[in-house]
Structure formats: C-alpha cells, structure tokens
Image (cartoon, grey):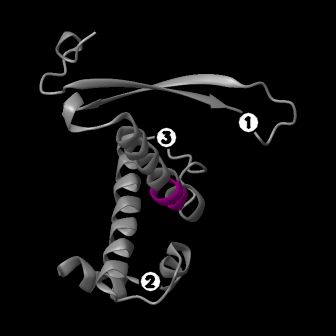
Amino acid sequence: MSPEEIGLCGCWQVIAVQRECQDLTTPGAALTVEVGYYVTSLTVSETTDAFLLAAIRNHWSAIENGTHYRRDVTLAEDACRVAHRQGAAVLVCLRNLANGLYELERHRGHTQVDTFNSWCEQQTFTSVWPLLKR
C-alpha cells in the first residue's frame, strides 16, 4: 500500500518494524510480537534500511531513556490520578515545561547537576521565573 492510499501525501515510504517483546519482570512470561509502522518523506534512493532502522531506534531510545523516564520516574506521571481531562493536560504541559527548562539549562551550561531529579529538587519559583522570561 502506498502512503497516498492511506492518506499520507508527501510521504515516500511506509516502514513496518516487527518487535519481539518479553516482560522481564514476570518469570516465564510469553514472548509477544508487535508491529510498529513509520512513514518518511525520504525516497528509497535517498536512504538505506540500516539508516532508517538506526533513526527509529535512536528516536525510541531518546524517548524511553529521556523524556518518558523523566516524566514517569522523576515526576511520577504514571502514578498521577488526576481524572479531569483539562487538569491532566495542564499537568502534562507543566511537566514538559520543566523537562524543557532543564534541557535548555544543560545546553547553555547554566547547571552543574547531572540528573533531572537533582535539578528539580533545587528549583523554586524565584529560580525558575527568570528562565521563563529569557
């Protein structure tokens, strides 16, 4: 099936990646197979399968080991039980803001702490407010 046939005009390739997964926290857990689909605007002649696979792996590595880990472990997002949709959306925005400010401060060399958790523990309203005004 072409990208246009599934409503993705401007894309040149649809990529299916099969993953075999096993829950390592459950002894003897069954192996499951998942298929993830990706699209790209790169033509077949502009890229290789190895490049696309590396891009997909790097993307998920950054998501799982960076943003998701910070939001779940440091900010306890998965444990949050806010039921109101708008309240949950506001909390997501605040978590993203905190994560973004930390990354920006690290990039600028304005923080010496090496973990998001340590950085969050040091922040107060008066220390974060100037970062928002930059």
What's the amino acid at mark 2?
Gln
Q: Which one is nearer the viewer's eye here, 122 or 37?
A: 37
Q: Residue at x 22, y 18 (%)?
A: 3
Q: Earlier in the sequence, mark 1 or mark 3?
A: 1
Label 2 SS: loop
* Residue 37 falls inside the magenta stretch: no
Instruction: Say whether marks 3 and 2 touch (CB < 8 Å).
Output: no
Neighbor class of circle 3 (other Cα within 10 Å; few <14, some 14-19, many 20+) is: few
Query: Dot 1 corresponds to which residue?
Result: 23
Q: Secondary structure at mark 1?
A: loop
Q: Is the residue 26 above or below the residue 94 in the image?
A: above
Dot label at residue 83: 3
Label count reads 3
- Up-down relation of residue 132 to residue 91 (above or below): below
- The residue at 56%/24% (across/down) is 34
Mark 3: secondary structure: loop
Q: Residues within 10 Å of mark 2 (few under 14, many from 20)?
A: few
Q: Which residue is mark 2?
A: 123
Task: Kindly report the distance in space between the C-alpha atoms of the residues bearing marks 2 and 1.
Answer: 36 Å
Residue 122 against residue 16 in the figure, above or below: below
Q: At 49% across and 40% down in the image, what residue appears?
A: 83
Which marked residue is nearer to the observer: mark 3 or mark 2?
Answer: 2
Q: Amino acid at mark 3?
A: Ala
